Image (cartoon, rainbow, N blue to C red):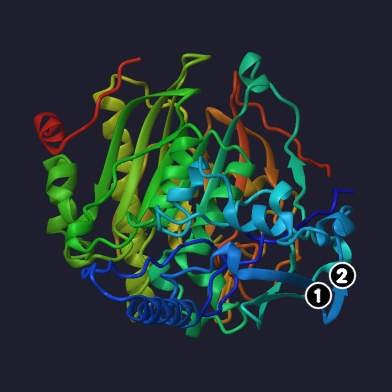
């Protein structure tokens, strides 16, 4: 049985109140007249102190409580006072509790200081167990946590919720035949992290409003992604503005494919992160469907643009700013020397007609797979080079894009759409097939996220989803409406079918000019 763990994100409560627990002094305005008498100086000082107190009380998240203002602190679970500290008596003797001082001051050299609240000059709550004044246990799950503290004879209560994050189990997929490569699997993460522009509190009434904001979600996302240590992470709905998330992943040794141009109001995109200690980047490509003429060879684009079956969808893709920026990363394993091409996709959804959505998706996918062929050709690599196409397909088993990926062909009103790769979905190898859902919201739940791999890659194990999720995501511990998928892969020495058992270099950056030079 998997070990149980209680998670409070961040490890100290983040609360939706007009006063934030952190340190920032509000300096009074400088005195310009040095000839004022003592009474005027005293009155000026009192006015400054009054303004300072008013600013603290009426904070709009830009001002913070100084730790010296705190004189007492108590913790309650569902209204019952608790004390989780073994040194409680010793701390009570301190004029200002040592734990509170540590709790609010933090480490002045803490690298996270410049990123968490977006206030580089502020000391903030350090996010670690040593500095936490309360560590929740299993018995506290789903109960209300109240922190009561006194500031200048005024008592404030800050409320947060303790949420239990269930552990997930692995399913092993048969015997391994990959030799040395099987001993060093490639861990692929698939995760639509939900863009901040789609997390309006009004759309998620069951989720505490503060947990939908970017500061909170970026902290949870970075910890959640790094916890699983993926070699390659295919993420969707990534915003350029998510600097804290990006910085935390880069600091942990990851790099990413190109970012879109924020100045052109391109809100979100699909992206590939990869571990720099394992892979060398050979080529990366941002696939913007508004620039198809710069991406596809003329002989690939012209038939799609001329056909009455597909031309209107090409036009729609050229006009859309929505779900139209995907990514490729061609990587070389530093240890084995083998290449792997990883693609992150987010197929279109948002047209008023279901048919338009589904037809746009298969056209997007057809183009994406052609671009995969082009990348391998540009780098003189064989067509059976290991390929991973991971993403939010907005499609499930039996639907159009799924059929195209699985069979390699689909007829769009008589127009043949094809690709040359033999692909399989990692989670379809489970005894039960694809999971019941990979997204769970108030309005929709279904299995629409997949990790597709070519026949040169074998699946060693996948991370099960389970059935413990609330009716609606996101939540305090799961920061997206989609559920993260994880698969361990290895390069196979043969194509034998596997049985399933369940258990608990030189880097070049491709530019538009480079692509045009290879177009025919």
Above or below residue 357? Residue 120 is above
Quadrant of the drawing holding the C terminus: top left
Dot 2: few (<14), some (14–19), or many (≥20) neighbours within 10 Å? few
- Residue 32 coordinates in the image, percent (x, y): 21, 68
Label 2 element class:
strand
Whether label 2 touches label 1, CB < 8 Å: yes
- Residue 134 coordinates in the image, percent (x, y): 77, 60
- Residue 204 coordinates in the image, percent (x, y): 54, 80
Residue labelled with disc 2: 82
User: Rounded to the nearest whole Å, what is the CA distance between mark 2 and mark 1?
Assistant: 6 Å
Tell me the residue at 39%/55% (across/down): 242
Left or right, 305 with respect to 152, comes to: left
Tell me the residue at 49%/23% (across/down): 277
Tell me the residue at 69%/70% (across/down): 71
Left or right, 172 with respect to 490, comes to: right
Asked whether 151 or 281 is in front, the reply is 151
Residue 454, numbered label: none
């Amino acid at each position: 049985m998997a070990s149980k763990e209680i998670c409070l994100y961040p490890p100290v409560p983040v609360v939706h109140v007009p006063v934030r627990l952190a340190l920032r002094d509000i300096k009074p305005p400088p005195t310009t007249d040095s000839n004022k008498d003592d009474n005027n100086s005293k009155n000026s000082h009192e006015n400054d102190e009054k303004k300072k107190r008013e600013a603290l009380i009426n904070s709009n998240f830009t001002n913070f409580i100084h730790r010296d203002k705190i004189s007492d602190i108590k913790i309650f679970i569902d209204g019952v006072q608790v004390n989780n500290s073994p040194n409680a008596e010793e701390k009570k003797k301190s004029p200002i509790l040592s734990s509170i001082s540590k709790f609010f001051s933090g480490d002045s050299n803490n690298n996270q200081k410049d990123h968490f609240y977006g206030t580089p000059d502020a000391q903030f709550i350090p996010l670690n167990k040593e500095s936490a004044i309360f560590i929740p246990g299993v018995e506290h799950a789903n109960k209300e946590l109240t922190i009561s503290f006194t500031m200048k004879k005024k008592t404030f209560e800050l409320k947060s919720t303790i949420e239990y994050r269930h552990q997930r189990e692995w399913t092993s997929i048969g015997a391994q035949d990959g030799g040395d490569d099987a001993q060093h699997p490639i861990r692929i993460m698939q995760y639509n992290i939900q863009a901040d522009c789609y997390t309006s509190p009004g759309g998620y009434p069951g989720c505490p409003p503060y947990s939908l904001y970017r500061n909170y979600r970026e902290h949870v996302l970075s910890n959640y992604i790094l916890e699983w240590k993926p070699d390659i992470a295919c993420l969707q709905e990534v915003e350029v503005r998510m600097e804290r998330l990006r910085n935390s992943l880069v600091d942990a040794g990851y790099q990413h494919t190109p970012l879109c141009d924020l100045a052109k109001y391109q809100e979100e995109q699909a992206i590939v992160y990869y571990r720099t200690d394992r892979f060398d980047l050979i080529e990366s490509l941002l696939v913007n469907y508004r620039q198809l003429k710069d991406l596809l060879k003329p002989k690939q684009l012209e038939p799609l643009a001329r056909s009455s079956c597909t031309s209107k969808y090409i036009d729609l893709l050229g006009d859309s700013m929505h779900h139209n920026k995907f990514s490729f990363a061609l990587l070389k394993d530093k240890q084995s020397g083998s290449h792997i091409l990883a693609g992150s996709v987010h197929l279109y959804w948002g047209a008023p007609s279901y048919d338009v959505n589904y037809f746009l998706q298969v056209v997007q996918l057809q183009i994406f797979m052609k671009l995969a062929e082009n990348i391998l050709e540009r780098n003189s690599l064989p067509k059976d080079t290991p390929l991973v196409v991971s993403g939010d397909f907005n499609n499930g088993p039996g639907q159009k894009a799924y059929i195209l990926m699985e069979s390699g062909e689909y007829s769009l009103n008589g127009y043949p759409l094809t690709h040359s790769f033999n692909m399989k979905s990692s989670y379809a190898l489970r005894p039960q097939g694809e999971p019941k859902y990979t997204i769970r919201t108030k309005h929709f739940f279904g299995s629409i996220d997949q990790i597709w791999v070519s026949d040169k890659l074998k699946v060693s194990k996948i991370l099960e989803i389970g059935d413990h999720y609330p009716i609606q995501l996101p939540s305090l511990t799961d920061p997206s409406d989609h559920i993260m998928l994880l698969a361990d892969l290895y390069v196979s020495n043969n194509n034998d079918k596997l049985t399933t058992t369940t258990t608990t270099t030189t880097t070049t950056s491709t530019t538009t000019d480079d692509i045009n030079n290879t177009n025919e």
